[in-house]
Amino acid sequence: MAEVNVNQNVVSPKKNSNSGTGALAKLFRRNDMGVVIATALLFLIFALVTDSFFTRYNLFNISRTAGLYVFIAMGQMIVLVIGGMNLSLGGIGGLVVVAAGYTMDSMGWSPWISVPIALAVGMLAGAFNGIIIVKSKINSFIITLASLFIFTGLVTGISQGFPYTEIPKSFTLMGRGSLLGVPYTFILAIVTLLIMAYVFKFTVIGRRILATGGNLEAAQLSGIRTDRIVFLCHVLSGLFGAIAGLLWVSRMGSAQPATGSDWLIISFAVAIIGGTALTGGEASMLALFASAILLTLIKNGLIMLNVNVYFEQTFLGLIILLAVSIDRIRAMLHSSTRKFGRRDATEA
């Protein structure tokens, strides 16, 4: 019977009539390769159009910034994948930056003490979001919007709006240094992406995270403690935001309270373009990596083409709109493909 079904699939006119739709659906669903190709094409275009693009200095800055964007996007991705969102990610980053700056500058503590404290601050901020969302059952949009103001208020209150400039030189090594010409930030981002890819594909906790985002009720019926998953993902979101904040301090050599003010757009743009479904349950580390490079190339290219910097936010907003549209089209095609598959299976 199995062989008959295979042969029917080959010669059936009905199957052939839908082959174009199936191919198109597969093309859109392969969002990882789509982003990779788009990134490669944009890289080639800028390399041909501008003479200063393909230089060692510029490539170093692009890879270093892309590494930072990876962590910002992962802070959003890990919440989007469970069907939520974290509007307070930038506030968490700012809070971590101030915590690091205050302990290293005002208190004079070693980075070996300040960094763990700053990471803990980020995770506690994420835990704050997670516990309220789990206990109140209120949408993450509302909770994280409120916590954004809370965290931003703490940043302003603690720092009084002034930067912390006395950052130990040893701490700037991670943000400014490199290995064989490759920035440490970029290397750390790749390693983290590989770890997360392994977690999602081969571990129980990774599959439970995807299951929770894919269908919350089904996950609960299968015995998954979804409340714990939601809490964990928000803690991880805080951790990734903390790492991004620390990398920024390390790169700049100072702790700026305004850090994180533009993370909302960056995190959503990179995560969504990078294949993270707004409805949850789907993420691609390869696409997220390519998307981080893509966004960096766009910002870098706009500068090199002497485009007015004040229009940068406009371009980023249009990119998010395009990404959301692509995500919606991809979801519709995925749904139609499943519908055709069920109908064909029934007819067979």
Image: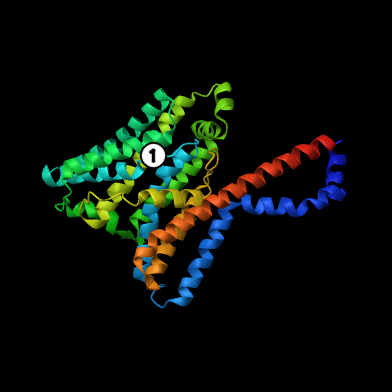
Callout 1 secondary element:
helix
Q: Nearer the viewer, residue 261 or 46?
A: 261
Mark 1 surroundings: few (<14), some (14-19) or many (≥20) residues within 10 A: many
Measured as percent of width and height from the top left, residue 50 is found at 43, 76
Measured as percent of width and height from the top left, residue 216 is found at 54, 29
Do we see residue 55 in this rendering?
no
Measured as percent of width and height from the top left, residue 94 is found at 27, 45
Q: Nearer the viewer, residue 1 or 134?
A: 134
Q: Report the residue that reaches farthest toward the bottom.
A: 51
Do we see residue 305 in this rendering?
yes
Left or right: where 57 falls relative to 321: left
Q: Residue at x 39, y 37 (%)?
A: 236
Left or right: where 265 falls relative to 105: right
Q: Nearer the viewer, residue 136 or 300?
A: 136
Q: How is the protein colored in the picture?
A: rainbow
- The kind of residue on which mark 1 rests is Ser
Measured as percent of width and height from the top left, residue 186 is found at 38, 55
Instruction: Locate the C terminus and report the quarter of the image it occupies.
Output: top right
| Residue 119 figure quarter | top left
Left or right: where 42 falls relative to 261: right
Q: Residue at x 88, y 40 (%)?
A: 4
| Residue 315 figure quarter | bottom left
Residue matched to label 1 = 237
Left or right: where 84 falls relative to 331: left
Q: Is 132 rendered above or below residue 114?
A: above
Q: Nearer the viewer, residue 197 or 340?
A: 340
Q: Residue at x 31, y 50 (%)?
A: 261
